[in-house]
Image: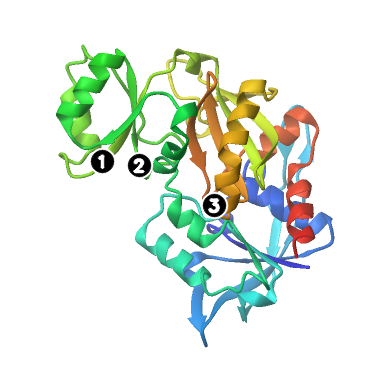
Amino acid sequence: MKIAFILDPIPNLDPTHDSTVAMMEAAQVLGHEVWVTQAAQLSVVGGKAHAYLQPLELVPVTLGENRWVTIPEWYQLREGAFLCLEEMDAVFMRTDPPVTVPYLYATYILDYVDPVKTLVVNSPQGIRTANEKMYTLNFSTVMPETIVTQDKRVIREFVEKQEAAVMKPLGGKAGEGILFLQPGDRNLNSLVEISTHQGKEPVMIQSYLPAAKDGDKRIILLNGKPIGAVNRIPTGKEFRGNMAVGGRVAGTEITDRELFICNQVAPKLVQDGLYFVGIDVIGGYLTEVNVTSPTGIREIDRLNGVKLGEQIIHWVTGNN
């Protein structure tokens, strides 16, 4: 089969960490053709989505002493062609957030892929529906106390009531811009003004979960079913556990409470065509639903001796 990946520039990817590379490697190992393109190379011609696609060959990573090992020349791109995306059996939309205007336009172009002919992961309509912060509000019964507002007064009242909170930009990624708030902080007003762009842009504020010190668990769901998890633990004086800000990763199990959360979110994820998703859980509470370019495969594979990439590709090819 032919599988295309819409991704960020390949030189920017880390083959020892990026889930996109893990899935491309898996597709190659399983005997499928891997093609790549970028969002800026998408077009609609004759009412169909097209892209400039290049065949990609990879040198898979190997497992060293508790880490993945790669070589400098880990990929090779072949001469490409301008093709209809429906010539592919599946297309992965793996461009990293934030979901900017060009990102949204790319999802509109992907609407012109016939889903009967080609599976798009994740659904472009689903990606537009699921802002990774706001979408979580669909599952308020398993979330911490949460508000979304740009009103400084409302934020201050919430922080005073909760005694501690975290403030998140609605379009952030990898922990960027997340702030810890306390009522007695003399910088509180300034932090809110900066984050809301002087009250012009809403933010999400959640009750701070003390269990965050023990880790922020990333659970990978495939077609609504949990297939693996990794715990991301804050290090040093950092309160965020995200790997991008230095969080330490550790093996973990999915608890009964977390399985309950997965069962709560699964029907809507599948309904919205969000087949490959990473949810974040702290202390038994859902904090985010990641649908654009969730990561964690490399860490889960290394810590648990599994091959999630191959599991995902098997599912994709089985649905074509």
Q: Secondary structure at mark 1?
A: loop
Please give the residue where the numbered disc 1 appears in the rendered image: 202
* Residue drawn at (45%, 13%) of the image: 210
* Relative side of 187 to 107, left or right: left
Please give the residue where the numbered disc 2 appears in the rendered image: 170
Q: Nearer the viewer, mark 3 or mark 1?
A: 1
What amino acid is at disc 3? Asn
Q: Nearer the viewer, residue 206 or 236?
A: 206
Q: Is residue 117 above or below residue 168?
A: below
Separation of disc 1 and disc 2 at Cα? Answer: 7 Å
What amino acid is at disc 2? Leu
Residue 292 picture location, percent across and down: 51, 50
Q: Is residue 10 above or below residue 133?
A: below
What amino acid is at disc 1? Pro
**In terms of image quadrants, where is residue 203?**
top left
Q: Are marks 1 and 2 in contact (CB under 8 Å)?
A: yes
Mark toward the start of the polypeptide (1 vs 2): 2
As drawn, the label of residue 129 is none
Q: Are marks 2 and 3 in contact (CB under 8 Å)?
A: no
Residue 140 picture location, percent across and down: 44, 32
Q: Nearer the viewer, mark 2 or mark 3?
A: 2
Q: Secondary structure at mark 3?
A: helix
Q: Secondary structure at mark 2?
A: loop
User: What is the residue that sits farthest to the bottom in this orientation?
Assistant: 46
Please give the residue where the numbered disc 3 appears in the rendered image: 12
Q: Nearer the viewer, residue 182 or 65?
A: 182
* Relative side of 192 to 58, left or right: left
* Residue drawn at (35%, 28%) of the image: 146
